Image (spheres, rainbow, N blue to C red):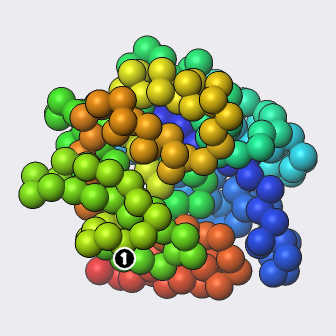
Amino acid sequence: MKFAVIAAGDGSRLEQEGVAANKPLVTLAGEPMLDRLLRIFTDAGASEVAVIVNERMPEVVRHARKMEEERRTSPCPLRLKVAATPSSMHSFHAISEWLEDGPFCLTTVDTVFRPDEFNSYIRAFRSGSADGLMAVTDYVDDERPLYVGTDGDLNITGFYDNPTGCRYISGGMYCLTPPALDTLRRCVAAGQSRMRNFQRQLVADGLKLKAWPFSKILDVDHAADIAKAEQFLSEIHYE
């Protein structure tokens, strides 16, 4: 199973708030976020990890190319795309050609979660029959959360900008099968640019999506989020 990381954003909010490191290289518990994800994905049995980084971030490009070289002969190689894209959906589209031959897991570089819960999530997807298994959480600490409608069996019924009685929000991690890429390409061709609209279109296209709850998923969008993520990881470490 392949994994993919979108790490091509400009990180403008972190920069404006005085964080010197580019987002993929922000360290949590002494480890750059990009490195942390690749380690977790490797531990989860990834056969390959596709990564897209922003060509306007030379330090990130150098770091990623070094990782690509170091992993060239490993059981889990890194496949790297260097580009500037206008949105996360376009970044996903740019690496989609590498994800066509089987199920895959996609996330953005700033997603922070418990590795044990992630491993359970991947096992559930591998053993299930859904077209997509979407990571969700009832921990809400986001400026513009995407609310996820579910039925009693955690089948996803819709994605909403407002709560509308939803318990969960999207965690920004997506386990998907190749039919989702057809939806992605139609979205891009139609001028869509937001991942939440892609997810809505998956439902509209009739793909079977299920939700997998995590206790907590954090995104590192602001300087204050770094401290929250560090605290979260320290609590996991000392359990």
Task: Determine which residue is flagged by label 1.
Answer: 139
Q: Residues within 10 Å of mark 1 (few under 14, many from 20)?
A: some
At 87% from the left edge and 50% from the top edge, which residue is drawn? 57
Residue 11 quadrant: bottom right
- In this rendering, position of residue 72 left or right of residue 121: right
Q: Looking at this rendering, what residue extends furthest in the top direction?
A: 101
Quarter of the image containing the C terminus?
A: bottom left
At 32% from the left edge and 51% from the top edge, which residue is drawn? 158
Task: Indicate the position of residue 95 as horizontal and vertical percent values.
Answer: 63, 28
Quarter of the image containing the N terminus?
A: top left
Against 228, residue 34 (above or below) is: above
- In this rendering, position of residue 121 left or right of residue 238: left
At 65% from the left edge and 25% from the top edge, which residue is drawn? 189
Can the viewer see residue 40 in this picture?
A: no
Can the viewer see residue 141 in this picture?
A: yes
Q: Between residues 225 and 58, which one lies in front from this camera angle? A: 225
- Look at label 1 and name its amino acid: Tyr
